[in-house]
Image: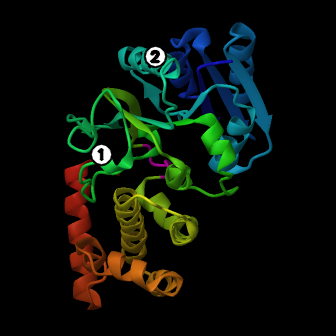
Amino acid sequence: MKLLSITVPCYNSQEYMKKCVDSLLAGGEDVEILIVDDGSTDDTGKIADEYAREYPDIVQAIHQENGGHGEAVNIGLANATGLYFKVVDSDDWVNQEAYQVVLSTLEELIRGPQTLDMLISNFVYEKQGASRKKVMQYRKCFPKNEIFGWNQVKHMHTGKYILMHSVIYRTELLKSCGLRLPKHTFYVDNLFVFEPLPHVCTLYYLDVNFYRYFIGREDQSVHESVMISRIDQQIQVNKKMIDILVNASVKSRQLKQYMVRYLTIITAVSSVMLIRSGKKENLEKKSELWKYLQDADKGLYRAVRHGIVGGAVNLPGKGGRSMSTTIYKICQKFYGFN
């Protein structure tokens, strides 16, 4: 059995996927790399097959009809044989030194007395054209280099949240909790992180800058103009996160607080994108989204709506919407996201 399964969802990735896969090959035979060709129309599938032929004990090429990023992750998870599971997008890569630390840590932990559910590490925003690289790290939030539970998590402010780039899950945990991401939908990486959280009992934080998250292509899903054009998919994910939190059995107070803050951030992003579109119908969608949250759980609605972030994206009138956009731009500059 492999130590770590890494799924690489690929759609028309011929121009950049080699940098990603080459960075992952350094894991050697402790790792299986599942390249999922999601119905590409360029040479992505051919490149995947070449890697599988050259590294038959490490790389598996999987070809499917186009189902979107979520379906590619689903297929990767279904085929994963490793004890742990990670997703690395095809335009991203990993740091070699940190990679070896991650693997040696997992190897050590599986020989220990406790079962680890989730390993967290830092990631770096590799923003095109930016001279300063923003690092998302968790030094003030988590104990370092030890297994811990949610009750040992310190306060995580609203801008400090765990993304897909940060996390490695225990494979069986993802399968047993029934994780299945929606097809033909962007932004499902938030569901990948969010949905399994109530099933996580043990965590481990490695303070290494492992994942390199590239942002800057005009066609990238997180580019603002692209997000606005796909806003209905963002809303779909947002509503799914509401449903998950309302229906989940979350015993840990710290975890519940964190999940509420995570939902707050996603709902704020949805709201700002709807405002920035400048379309009347999207302002109506914004109102409908907040009504959906209110109808789902009034207590949760109050927690999200009447906090600082919820208030900032719901300022009344045209002037209020302009102020919401200004606040968003300040946060965008400070945190370095797209």
- Residue 86, compared with residue 104, is above or below; it is below
**Residue 51, quarter of the rendered image:** top right
In the image, the segment drawn in magenta is 217-221
Residue under pointer 1: 152
Most frequent secondary structure within the magenta stretch: loop
Q: Position of residue 187 (x, y in %)?
A: 53, 55
Q: Nearer the viewer, residue 123 or 316?
A: 123
Residue type (three-letter) at the residue carrying disc 2: Glu
Q: Position of residue 279 (x, y in %)?
A: 45, 82
Q: Is residue 250 left or right of residue 162?
A: right
* Number of the label disc, if any, that sits on residue 119: none
Residue 189 visible to an observer of this rendering: no
Characterize the local packing of mark 1: few (<14), some (14-19) or many (20 or more) Cα atoms within 10 angstroms.
Answer: few
Residue sitting at 42 percent across and 14 percent down?
Answer: 100
Q: Secondary structure at mark 2?
A: helix
Residue sitting at 24 percent across and 79 percent down?
Answer: 322
Residue type (three-letter) at the residue carrying disc 1: Gln
Residue under pointer 2: 108
- Residue 263, compared with residue 223, is above or below; it is below
| Residue 244 colored in magenta in the image | no
Q: Position of residue 87 (x, y in %)?
A: 55, 36
Q: Position of residue 63 (x, y in %)?
A: 78, 34
> Which residue ends up furthest to the front in the rendered image?
113
Q: Is residue 180 left or right of residue 157?
A: right
Which quarter of the figure is the N terminus placed in?
top right
Q: Is residue 245 left or right of residue 48?
A: left
Who comes first in sequence, dot 2 or dot 1? 2
Q: Nearer the viewer, residue 136 or 338?
A: 136
